[in-house]
Amino acid sequence: MSAMGKAGRAGTAGSTGTASRESSTGSTGSTGKANKTSSTSKAGKRADRKELKRSAHRAGRGSVLRKVARAGASRRKLQSLILVLVTAGSVAAALLAAQLLAGVNAPFDQAFARQNGSELTVQYNGAKATQAQLATTAHAAGVTASAGPFPMVQLSHATAQIPGIDLSTFPLPTLTVVGRPDNGGPVDDVQLSAGHWPTAPNQIVIENGSSILASAQLGTSVSFPGSPGDPALTIVGFTNTVSQTADAWVLPGEASALRPHGTAPAYQMLYRFAAAGNDSQVAADQNAVAASLPSGAVLGSQSWLVLRTAADTGGLAIIPPFLAVFGILGVILAVVILAGAVSATIGTSARRIGVLKALGCTPTQVVRTYCVQAMIPCLLGVVVGTAAGSYGATVLLDSTGQALNTGAPPLTLWVELLVPGAALALVVATAVLAAGRAGRMSVIEALSTGHAPAARRGRRAQRLLARSPLPRSISLGLATPFTRPARAIALVVAVVFGVIAVTLAVGVSSSLGRASADVSEDGSSGITVFVGAQDNGPPSLAQSNQAVAAIKAQAGTAAYYSTIEFQMPVSGVSEDATVREYQGDASWSHFPLISGHWLTGPGQAVVPTHLLRATGLHLGSVVTATEFGRSFPLTIVGEVFDTHNGGMEVITDATAFAGAQPAFPDGEISVGLKPGVDENAYVTALNKALAASDSVVAPSATGGGKLTITMDTLSVLMTLILVSVAALGVIGSVVLDTRERVHDIGVYKALGMTPRQTTNMVLTSVLSLGFIAGVIGVPLGVWVHNLVLPLMGDQVQATLPPDVLNVYQLAELVLFAAGGIAIALLGALGPASWAGRIRTATALRTE
């Protein structure tokens, strides 16, 4: 059996081998015969496959990639939402900042062109020229447009009831009231900021910034006791006009009715000319329009060049450079936040990019796909941000226009187009860079990258912190920034800008508060007595002497002084210079000194910075004032911070002109009180004593003035915007970082980490970054403040005194640095709460 078995196996093997060889031989022969046909067939198939691939690419690959991009944007809802929010916030901040930059660039010139401003405003005597004669001046040589004649009247001793200010017994300064049928016209298109133009005889509109009436409310009644019938008019509107053609407007018939008995009628004409770019051209234009009128018909005139100089060098000129700095900060911050968010979002998709490459997508197709995927949410964000930024810019430009008395400038069209377009271009550029970097990875490298950063990143920091006595959740949080250093740097930059904004805003507000206190009407810091204010006409010498006697006798008076201005020739300054003379003791309250010293005797003078710059004079220079034919040399002993009269006045003691000037009555007297004296009680008692001289004590001004209030408001608004955008950048960064590490968070929770510890870990991950940002941002904010304030001073032709520049206290700087931590924690609070609430199983299942 064994032999038979062996034989059988051998026979079978032999048979099989033979058959196999035969089969092999046959197969080889067959293959050889078909070789030529097979090679031809393969070449055709390869060509067919290439053609099919090209057809598929042409017909479907583009649409497939678009579907992939749309699916990625819709599936990754959180990342898409972050991009929408960050884009909207960044575009809104950038658009608002850019509109402010455009709106505050030469604001007077913009408003003058927008309102068809009056290049020459002339007041005419109605007793010398008729309205028909005045109307013919519109056809004088060089006149391109005109408006008028409008009846005008100057009214004194008007009173009103304004909330918070008792003006019932305190008459207002003289008001120039003009009668116009409407606010439009070819010249001086008066812009209404509130209310409406008068429609009835008993209505009046007030020019913003012209008098204290600008702080009244609509519906306030203004009484004019010097006009026939002692009429009372109701305020129905407020206006802005850079031409400053009037303090108030009424209907033409009402203007004539308000004219006091015994005064001649007066009219106003407004002109624009073919050439009015300098003083000589304006003077020639005025001669041309007055040439056909009788002698004495012209009562006065006002050139637009004087108004422009005042606007460019006055106190309000500090607003444009201030807003420009915030605008630049806003644009830079928006670029940093948006670019960082887009880059980080695409950076989290490395594994998905690896899948696309494994399916055959080229790097170019990957870049194209992720550009489309980023554009989908960003486009929505651009739309939302453009709407929000435009609305915010409208509000801020309106506030700025009110502060500058130029009216609200319109939105700049090219800015509305440029900012959204630039934002989309930035999204594409960032997406190309980020996706291109990931697209150049190999398939294996991209797939292995996954959602989490490389394990080696931050390992050393984790080991070092693990050895510290800190709780493990805290040490893990502190080590987190080292795993994504680029993202951490972007977060620090965002918070730094927020800290800079806060530091700058508080510093500018403090500086303006001190500058406002420094530059009062005459440098005073006490109360002011208006001599003869309740009597018709200017104060008399008797009234002045009575007021001075009452002030001296009043208990609580520490010192007092008065000032009076004269126009006189001063060598080296002007043939018609303003000389401000002090009478009394002003050592307790005067303009802040920048260099030198205050007046200590006759023959001395102090001057503003602008006068020194414009004339080339310096401390120690001697100028000669000429009064009543006599020369009085004055030695410049001090440089002061003074913006009055365009910073071109000479300040001296009245004793310098002793014997040459007659005694003049005091119009206003500044009074300083002894320490501990109750101001309200003092004012009440002094008002009783001043009744005999028809004098009154002015109500104390509160709130720091319109300029300070406006600047504070703009500072707060701009700071809130920049801080909000910075916090939004933190939110985006922390959300992406937390989503990347959600699997690790699940592991930590599985090992016993509590929700509170998880929340603390995420918050701690930004704590150190906020601290670093605060430490960097505070010095930068102080540096920007010290850079901007001198520029603001240059706008008003003044060197700012040290007390205006040195406003920061150590405690404030520490708080500002802590603000960096606050901004970082504020942005991380939402993602940290989510990380604490997520369930362990959910976190572990997340890839």
Image: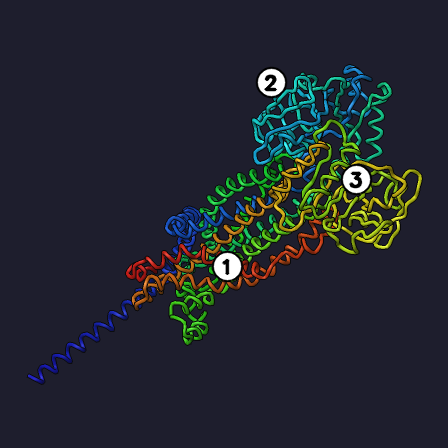
Residue 435 lies, with reference to residue 401, above or below; the image says below
Where residue 259 sits, quadrant-wise, is top right
Where is residue 382 shown, x and y percent of the image? Answer: 50, 44
Residue 651 in view (yes/no): yes
Q: Which amino acid type corresponds to the residue marked 3 in the rendered image?
A: Ile
Q: Which amino acid type corresponds to the residue marked 2 in the rendered image?
A: Ala
Dot in front, 2 or 1: 2
Neighbourhood count class around disc 1 (C-alpha, 10 Å): few under 14, some 14–19, many 20 upward: many
* Front residue (pair 800, 292): 800
Where is residue 589 shown, x and y percent of the image? Answer: 72, 49
Q: Please tell me whether mark 2 sits on a helix, a strand or a loop.
A: loop
- Reading the chain from its start, which is encountered first: label 1 or label 3? 1
Where residue 746 sits, quadrant-wise, is bottom left
- Residue 729 shown left or right of residue 808 in the figure: left
Residue at coordinates 80% horizontally, 48% vertically from top-left?
Answer: 607
Residue receiving disc 3:
564
Q: Please tell me whether mark 1 sits on a helix, a strand or a loop.
A: helix
Residue 189 in view (yes/no): no
Residue receiving disc 1:
491
Q: In the rendered structure, find residue 404 and report the number of the disc placed on it.
A: none
Q: Which amino acid type corresponds to the residue marked 1 in the rendered image?
A: Leu
- Residue 617 shown left or right of residue 684 in the figure: right
User: How far apart are the alpha carbons under marks 3 and 2?
Assistant: 41 Å
Where is residue 260 shown, x and y percent of the image? Answer: 72, 19
Q: Quadrant of the N terminus?
A: bottom left
Q: Are marks 2 and 1 in contact (CB under 8 Å)?
A: no
Residue 447 lies, with reference to residue 412, above or below; the image says below
Residue receiving disc 2:
200
Neighbourhood count class around disc 3 (C-alpha, 10 Å): few under 14, some 14–19, many 20 upward: some
User: How far apart are the alpha carbons under marks 1 and 3?
Assistant: 58 Å
Residue at coordinates 68% horizontally, 55% vertically from top-left?
Answer: 803
